[in-house]
Image (spheres, rainbow, N blue to C red):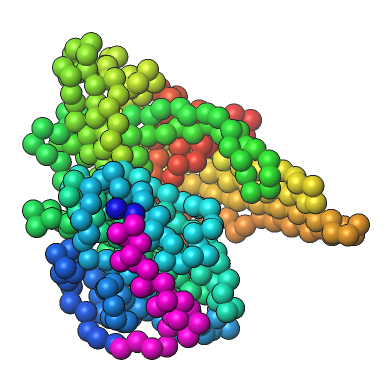
Amino acid sequence: MGNRNSERIRGVKSVLELLVVLFCLLSCPQALAASADIGGLTVTLPDAASGWRKAGKGDLFMLQKDFPETEDDKRGSALIQISKPLSGGRNSLPAGVKSFVASLPEMAKEDILIKHYGVTINGHDIRVEERCCVQQENVSISQIVVGVANDKRQAYLQLVLLNLKGDRSQSAEADFEALVRSVKLDPSDKDFDLVPASDDGGLDGVFTHLDTGVRPNVFGGVDFYSDSEITMFEPKGLFSTKLPKGGRSIVEHCRENPSDCGLYKLTGGGLFSSAGSIEMRSLTSAYGTIEIETKPLSKKGDDLVIDGDDYRAVPPFRDGATLDGAWVYTFASSGMTATSSGSVAASNRLTLHKNGTFERSRWSGASMTNEIGGSQSGVTASGDRPGSSGRYRLSGYRLDLTDATGKTQSLSIFEPDKSSDGLLVINGNNYLKDDGQ
């Protein structure tokens, strides 16, 4: 299968290299339809108004979007390439992705920076591999390759970014992610959507699990973390690992933020059997990659035990509830290498009063030193950020802060410890109560 893919893709090599050298100047704009059939592969194309146009000729369907030169950025381009379906099963998907990556020979030498493996919403195998960055003819090139396969057919898609970074890169990637989610390899495939099946669901509520450990930081050191992770279960089978903001329902939140969400069902006897388990189909990327895990499940009062870990039920705040005290979130990170060291720290303080008013203050600081050729340089900066005050409102898992100008900020909030306000998790950050205020 790898040899057949290589033969089909080999002709693309010269086209890509030419595009890199000429910087994508030879293209022919065409209006794009919302949906396209590419040799039996159905995809939803980006809106023509977003700047994408059909370009190039050959075995691959190609789209191009150009970005003009600015004071901060060079002129850049993004290319999307889509293959017609090829014969081959799931087992040869890794070899096919490898062959497609090799359409940019220098890129094949680079390590994979980001990868996602799983299945699609239609049960097809999917692999996503991202590589960066190669310099050719003063052009910076990065590449994202996606392969999708079922038992009989495969398809490959590629995004090539030329001199793109920051917001421009992110916008092109977002369009590519949406296109990948729309892929239909078979006529019977359904549109991408997290819609529970009739046998999904069975739980209701918000549950928190304490996750602790260490992880590397950007300074070359490691940070200890202690996160109160949440899982919100909707009775019909939808779950989210983040609380919806702004009063949105979990359905609305998952439609807007699919990578926070997934589907679940209870299997093996349900909650009241020792053989109970939960199948969680988590969306692990914006490309629609789904990871399926089945874990033991039991119930302990109002709480859950999933795979041996305690998940405590988190009750919502009643509408109009008030708190009294000051809570502080502190972040610090530091580390050093052979030639540099650095640190960053931040502190947010939120005071809530019984009468429904609040005050807010923030502080941050950072330092960095570098040693080059025996010469040392460094920089240190710190300062207070503008504070604010006004009125607040609690309802469910939502905290609304309305400042003196009338501007309202909506944050997620919950108490991970039952019958205690010693810790509040606000927008995912741990705020400890300051008893010495």
**Nearest to the observer: residue 49 or residue 407:** 49
* Residue 232 pos. (x, y %): 29, 36
Q: Tell me, yes or no, whether the highlighted magenta stretch contains residue 127.
A: no
Question: Which residue is located at x 58 percent, y 71 percent?
Answer: 135
* Residue 223 pos. (x, y %): 63, 37
Question: Which residue is located at x 44 percent, y 62 percent?
Answer: 102
| Relative side of 115 to 32, left or right | right
**Nearest to the observer: residue 20 or residue 229:** 20
* Residue 212 pos. (x, y %): 52, 28
Residue extending furthest top? 274
Dominant secondary structure, magenta: helix
* Residue 48 pos. (x, y %): 26, 79
Q: Would you place residue 172 above or below residue 319 in this image?
A: below
Chain part drawn in magenta: 3-28
Question: Which residue is located at x 13 percent, y 55 percent?
Answer: 186
**Nearest to the observer: residue 12 or residue 419:** 12
Q: Quadrant of the C terminus?
A: top right
Q: Is residue 433 visible?
A: no
Question: Which residue is located at x 38 percent, y 44 percent?
Answer: 412
**Nearest to the observer: residue 434 or residue 25:** 25
Q: Would you place residue 374 above or below residue 395 in this image?
A: below
